Image (spheres, grey):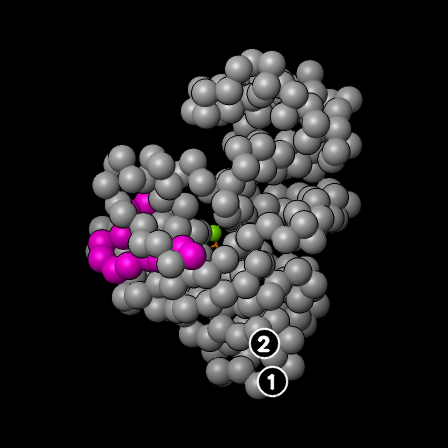
Amino acid sequence: MKLEINQLSKTFGAQRVLCDVGIAIEGHAIVLIGPSGGGKSTLLRVIAGLEYPDSGDVRLDGESLRFDEQSLRIHRRRVGVVFQSANLFPHLSALANITLPLTRVFGQSNEEARETAMQLLRRFELGDHAGKRPAQLSGGQRQRVAIVRAVAIRPKFLLFDEPTSALDPEMTSEVLDMISELRAEGRDLLLVTHHLAFARKVADQIAFLASGQILDHAPNAEFFTSPRAPAVQQFLDRVLKY
Ligand SMILES: Nc1ncnc2c1ncn2[C@@H]1O[C@H](COP(=O)(O)OP(=O)(O)OP(=O)(O)O)[C@@H](O)[C@H]1O
Ligand SMILES: [Mg+2]
């Protein structure tokens, strides 16, 4: 994925959440880190076509995002998004949560959608849980179903916003294993995470966002080994302390 952002700004009321964000970065796995409230989710949502910026330009693989409703609808079909909490429909089975977008948005037949969904569920060892509703699944299973739902639409890009922050350590590893596997397949992904060890493992590129600005970015190996800007170093020292 090639991500180019120019002078991107976003305000909520009086608060400037993204302030002239600029970055040009390329890699299969781009990881975004930074302190809470820094604007990571907002940036990810803009890239996903779920939030309008006030100004600025976002290019994905050389193509500018257009922020009119019709272009956004098309863009959203190319992007699979997984949020902190799985956001599954509570009244539908895992299977139906995955097939619904395929039939409603992508026009697949019920059989075709079911086939796609079951194949992915089995692949990620969720086949036995296909008929369960979200409340009958563990947190880790729910999150893996949400990832299957995002992957099932065959997105060009997968975006993850702290997909493990609501999970305990064991469930966290099941979800991170799944993301590693998708990464190993060469899928393009953009991941917001506070798991620096995981970032170190999967990222090609790491970017640091704080107070609405990209303060630093570098290839993975470099990011953790060479000295960084003071604000970044402070953050790393704080997070890596325990
Ligand atoms: N819809 C909204 N309306 C008003 N303010 C918002 C909205 N979304 C985000 N904000 C504000 O924008 C700032 C950045 O929020 P954002 O969620 O992008 O940060 P973040 O880096 O993802 O933080 P965290 O690591 O805690 O998830 C915060 O101060 C937040 O309160
Ligand atoms: Mg966030």
Mark 2 vs 1: CB contact within 8 A: yes
Circle 2 SS class? helix
Residue 49, magenta (yes or no):
no
Q: Is residue 212 visible?
A: no
Residue placed at 54% from the left, 37% from the top?
154
Quadrant housing residue 136: top right
Kindly identify the residue that appears in the image at 26 percent across and 45 percent down: 67
Amino acid at dot 1:
Ser
From the viewer's side, name the closer residue of 23 and 186.
186
Quarter of the rendering containing residue 175: top right
Residue 155 vs 30, above or below: the answer is above
Residue 117 point in image, percent of width and height? 64, 25
Q: Which residue is mark 1?
A: 226
Quarter of the rendering occupied by the C terminus: bottom right
Question: As drawn, is 51 to the left or to the right of 169?
Answer: left
Q: Nearer the viewer, residue 192 or 98?
A: 98
- Residue lying furthest bottom: 227
**Is residue 235 something that shows in the picture?**
yes
- The local secondary structure at tag 1 comes to loop
Taking the spot 63% from the left edge, 47% from the top edge, the residue there is 164
Q: Which mark is residue 223?
A: 2
